Amino acid sequence: MTHSEEDYIKAIYHLGTSGNERVATNAIAEQMETKPSSVTDMIRKLSEKEYVSYKKYQGVSLTESGIGKALSIVRKHRLWEVFLVDKLDFSWDEVHEIAEQLEHIKSEKLIDSLDKHLGFPKFDPHGDPIPSKSGVLTKTTKMLLNELKVNQSGICVGVKDSSAPFLKFLDKHGIALGDKITVLDKEDFDGSLHININDKSILISHQIGSNLYVRCD
Amino acid sequence: MTHSEEDYIKAIYHLGTSGNERVATNAIAEQMETKPSSVTDMIRKLSEKEYVSYKKYQGVSLTESGIGKALSIVRKHRLWEVFLVDKLDFSWDEVHEIAEQLEHIKSEKLIDSLDKHLGFPKFDPHGDPIPSKSGVLTKTTKMLLNELKVNQSGICVGVKDSSAPFLKFLDKHGIALGDKITVLDKEDFDGSLHININDKSILISHQIGSNLYVRCD
DNA sequence: CATAATTTTTAGACAAATCTAAAAATATAT
DNA sequence: ATATATTTTTAGATTTGTCTAAAAATTATG
């Protein structure tokens, strides 16, 4: 499996919410910053190798084998992210691009050793679950921060948007995974939230609230 | 610079004993397990980018810029080898192929952080020097074991052949970097050596002796 | 439901890296 | 030094992944 094939498999996996839904050619093209015609070409190849099931004009979905491949790539990506943050002191907004490269390194023993070295982490630095060697994902019951009602609290467990600007914003305002957040008030006007975090009370926009996952069981 | 270009630069570096000598097209082809015609094509490209100086039929040599590139690749390769052995408990005969992949990962910060994480090692698991960030190699005065005279001793500091079979052979006979080796006797007939290592006396062939580096200052 | 807009595919071209086969240059040997 | 052998380069083809432009299928609209 080539570098490029792996990139397509991963894109289809993410777009199809973990491989279940059918994904449109154009959506893949946009995600991969390429042209729809290139996507069609690659889809045909992946279809021949039985990583995707494909009917013309109907979009693609991953096969069992494709999902397995995708999980393996996601596992590698997220383990390398943990390595970069935990061992090399990278911040969580710097690791994505490097992990994009590292996820293509081929060696089962390498990944298993890395997993052990890191203490078999279950989540990456953004709170996303790391598939096990056998492809099992830890399920969590998380919700978006702005789905909480006033006076409800939750533990910050992940981000929906993991772009560097958003992550830097969180750092700047002292919001990190594991922090307890309480919704003090909600503005009807624009949906912005008054929250309490680390004994400080701050106001955040609706957009921020809709990109932070919390767990409040 | 592409993956493939980097592979050629590295091959030329190693064949030309660190970039000084001119290297023959055929030699590169053999090293890279490819055809001479492919090598000519790539050489022309590297020449246009000024990584090598090239005159038709006269072989190639690396330019300053080419040597710099080669040192950067070698630095990455050897640092990753140290990582695999020191942190992930790989043995020295398992690390080469994986490092061949890892050496192409692009991120200056990654390599500098890795270097720091490993404690700024000067040598890789096979005793080969790791170029510094600025491209400086630690020089050592090493010689081959079978250049020693009878009753001379040396510290094992590296291997010339770093293939898995040879490294496994050394492991099997309890020969490791840092061990003190004394030449007890030399057979005139076939050049094999009686040596003492770790309080044991063993007989090794000329071929083994000509692939082990020792320092005896 | 017929037409317009959009999406997707096809056809043909291109760049990168490789190959085979043949030609050109260089090196070797009697 | 001339013929032979080897090395190196060229010419043309192939594969992979991409692109543009145009055609075909699907979806949306009046």
Image (cartoon, coloured by chain):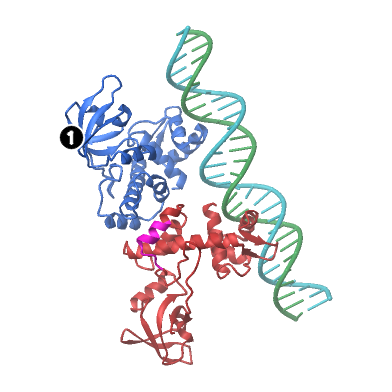
Chain colours: A blue, B red, C green, D cyan
Residue located 45% across and 54% down the image:
B108
Magenta stretch contains residue B117: yes
Question: With respect to residue A107, does A162 lie above or below?
Answer: above
Alpha-carbon neighbours of circle 1 within 10 Å: few (<14), some, or many (≥20)?
Answer: some
- In front of the other: A6 or B132: B132
Tag 1 subunit: A
- The residue that mark 1 highlights is A216
Residue B33 visible within the image: no
- Count of numbered labels shown in the rendering: 1
Q: Position of residue A115 (x, y in %)?
A: 29, 54
SS type, badge 1:
loop
- In front of the other: B78 or B204: B78
Which quarter of the figure has residue A216?
Answer: top left
- Amino acid at pointer 1: Cys
Query: What type of secondary structure mainly makes up the magenta span?
Result: helix
Q: Left or right? Give the position of A145 relative to A13.
A: left
The quadrant of the image that shows the C terminus of chain B is bottom left
Which quarter of the figure has residue B197?
Answer: bottom left
Q: Which residues are magenta?
A: B111-121
Q: Left or right? Give the position of B208 relative to D14.
A: left
Question: With respect to residue A95, does B60 lie above or below?
Answer: below
Q: Position of residue B10 (x, y in %)?
A: 53, 62
Residue located 53% across and 58% down the image:
B7
Q: Left or right? Give the position of A42 relative to A153.
A: right
Residue B169 visible within the image: yes
Q: Position of residue A97 (x, y in %)?
A: 42, 45
As drawn, which residue projects farthest toward the front? A200
Q: Position of residue A149 (x, y in %)?
A: 19, 26
